[in-house]
Amino acid sequence: MASSLCSLNSWAVPRAAKQALSSLVLLHKFPSSRNSRAFASASVSIAADNDIRSSDLVALEYADLNLTDKISKELGHVRIRQHVNPLSSSFSAPAPVPDWSEVFSDPTLPLMVDIGCGSGRFLIWLAKQNPDSQNYLGLEIRAKNKISMVHDLMDLNLVFVMQLVKRAEFWVKELALNNIHFIFANATVSFKHLISTYPGPLMLASILCPDPHFKKRHHKRRVVQKPLVDSILSSLVPGGKVFIQSDVLEVAVDMRNQFDSEDVLQHVNTVNPSVLCDDEGWLLNNPMGIRTEREIHAEFEGAKIYRRKLKFHAGKED
């Protein structure tokens, strides 16, 4: 799929080669005539400025969802606030527990929870691929995003405020998916509170490219801390998995150390030797079938993605 092909962007792409690369990406992403309209549209978009951007690759990766036009026409462009302080008092209250039978058509299905789900595209793509076999829950702490629009008649800049989860819910409604839900929540405070009420089994928890909080005094704001690790492990069923990744080695190592210190977790390559890892134990391939937006942007800039997947055995044979 486009994931493997687009990894070409992990090295700098000379301007003269970008047109050829964009055509190659498009041909790989849209091989059949049924996607000819999307192919033509994307070709024009990229070819117009004789360049290729990471945002173009995001659009290509998620082209099957056809979300861009739907959201731009209804709500405009969204600029995401990148950093949030989870220790702020405004994030100290647990998120309200939803009526699971209302948000999922079958609330007993195995559940995947994506902590820091961002725009939600990644989770929406997975939900569309597995409509009858799994439920998906996205937790996002970044609430407000500015949408700037220019009023044609008054020539005034109008600023609107919305939530990431609201936009994701809009997309879910447009796609008529009934196996996915998004909640504005501080995962550290709300994870166990929410998941303990879910009727089905928690099979996978993911934390993908979280805010790095580089300054040492801000490390305490990083999402992977002992309380969240404990909440995840107390909620997973035997055989359940944890998937973590970051484009920042320091952050990836910090997350790895937090989870590897738990003796109830095994790295997947010790369970399944066919899973390929490098000498440091990082997965060589993306196991999800789709890249996150941050993953695409980071690889486009030449960054390496550090991935680790662990299986929960709770002291029992699976």
Image: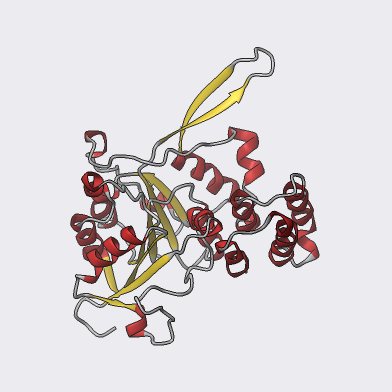
Where residue 14 appears, as percent x and y from the top left, is: 67, 57
Q: Nearer the viewer, residue 281 or 112?
A: 281
Quarter of the rendering containing residue 163: top left
Task: Identify the residue at image location x=24%, y=43%.
Answer: 94
Where residue 271 appears, as percent x and y from the top left, is: 34, 84
Vertical side of 251 occupied by 184: above or below? above
Q: Which of 23 and 279 is in front in this view?
A: 279
Q: Nearer the viewer, residue 54 or 86?
A: 54
53 relative to 159 in the view: left or right: right
Where residue 182 appears, as percent x and y from the top left, is: 42, 48
114 relative to 95 in the view: left or right: right
Task: Identify the residue at image location x=35%, y=43%.
Answer: 141
Where residue 146 appears, as percent x and y from the top left, is: 48, 30
146 relative to 186 in the view: left or right: right
Task: Identify the residue at image location x=53%, y=30%.
Answer: 147
Locate the C terminus by quadrant: bottom left
The single residue placed furthest to the top in the displayed view is 154
